[in-house]
Image: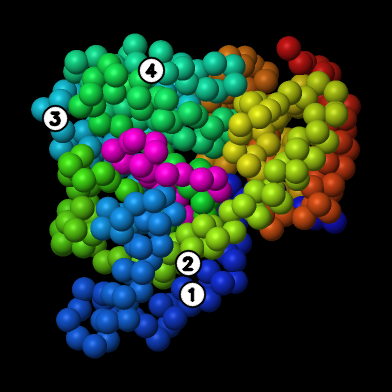
Amino acid sequence: MSAYLDHAAGTPLDPRVRAAAAPFLAEVFASPSGVHDAARRPAEAMDAARVSVGALIGAPADEIIFTSSPTEARNLAVKGLLRANRALGGRIVTTRVEHPATLAACRTATRDAGEVVEVGVDPEGRVSPHELASAVDDATALVAVAHGQGEIGAVQEIAALVDAARARRQEVRVFVDATETAGLIPVDAGVLGADALALGGPAMGAPAWCGALWVRPGARLHPLIEGGLQEAGKRAGAECLPAIVAMGAAADLARAEMGARLATMRPLTERLMSGVLAVPDVRLNGPREGRLPGHVQVSVGGVEGESLTLALALRGVAASPGSACTAHAGKAAPALEAIGLQPPWTRSAVLMTLRWTTTPDEVDAAIAAFSEAVPALRAMSPVGVRGA
């Protein structure tokens, strides 16, 4: 039996989400900015989607900005908040386990002035509130931290981190990347206390080509893409209405079904984790408890991650080598180095991600394929098992 365990890279749309978006790929084609009758339905659909996405995180609709992807949302948050709050300083404090898009945006935003300080993490990938606060100084304008880490699965205690940063500098702006969590686990913008939250379609069951950014009133944000006055002037350009409608529908379903989805995913995640860890010389990356639901990343002694991913594919199991986002980068995932892993462990990682649609049979097929592929690859290796 085949098993699709690469949902972090791409996941099938719920038929209800697909049905909601379908009319906006066909008979509903007018711009929501129009002033004629044909524009009414697109405008109402976009307004409804904004309400739905806001409700998912406990935020008003008019505080939601739609983007083309989670990557754009991250860039808009980092660059937009820093540019609009230059009076606070030019320094950004972030962590070593941020998404590559966030780290790249931080470095670009401070290229001409300012600096980026990356705070380390413990061996499970968690950020210490004390260490984060210690990195904040009177020139720090922005703190950027991910709620859920997409490579090693660690989920941060965001409220504690925000409180620690603000205790050091009350006016500092805080951006939280919730693209891996909002829709999978409860996320409440008011409770977290951040100034901006990035949201992604895939975590809630929407297409990968949609995202959103929540911005707290008063936080101030400069646009990244300039031109028209769409998205209250914060994101110019014609809106991708099918994606926005899909995101709204997915947000509604996530709110209604989150408990049931977690009840399905958590035992299956534990089942998969236990099965692959039963193979000798396999280590779990990230925490055993308090990790992203549906997320299992392991490093395998004596095996390269890419080779193992290909071997799994030949056995009908779809997974990613190390990271869903850096599978073709040809280098170790920075998050693995951040938690203290050394070669060859950094190059022997494989990531398997489930969703609420994953079946027990798929998990069992993946365990069987993994248990067969690992010793087969080790037997082919001229150096044998090289665990450390």
* Mark 4 and mark 1: Cα distance apart in space: 42 Å
Viewer-nearest of discs 4 and 3: 4
Q: Give the range drawn in magenta.
A: 184-202
Q: Name the N-terminal-most of marks 1 and 3.
A: 1
Q: Name the N-terminal-most of marks 1 and 2.
A: 1
Residue at (68%, 28%) from the top-left corner?
288
Residue indicated by mark 1: 20
Residue at (81%, 52%) from the top-left corner?
360
Q: What element carries label 3?
A: helix
The foreground one among 177 and 314 is 177
The quadrant of the picture occupied by the N terminus is bottom right
Left or right of 350, for residue 151: left
Residue indicated by mark 2: 249
Q: What element carries label 2?
A: helix
Quadrant of residue 170 in the image? top left
- Marks 1,2: beta carbons within 8 A: yes
The crowding category of the residue bearing disc 4, from other C-alpha atoms within 10 Å (few below 14, some 14 to 19, many at least 20), is many
Q: Is mark 4 on a helix, strand or loop?
A: helix
* Mark 2 and mark 3: Cα distance apart in space: 37 Å
Q: Is residue 166 visible?
A: yes
Question: Which amino acid lies under the numbered mark 2 shown in the image of this protein?
Answer: Ala
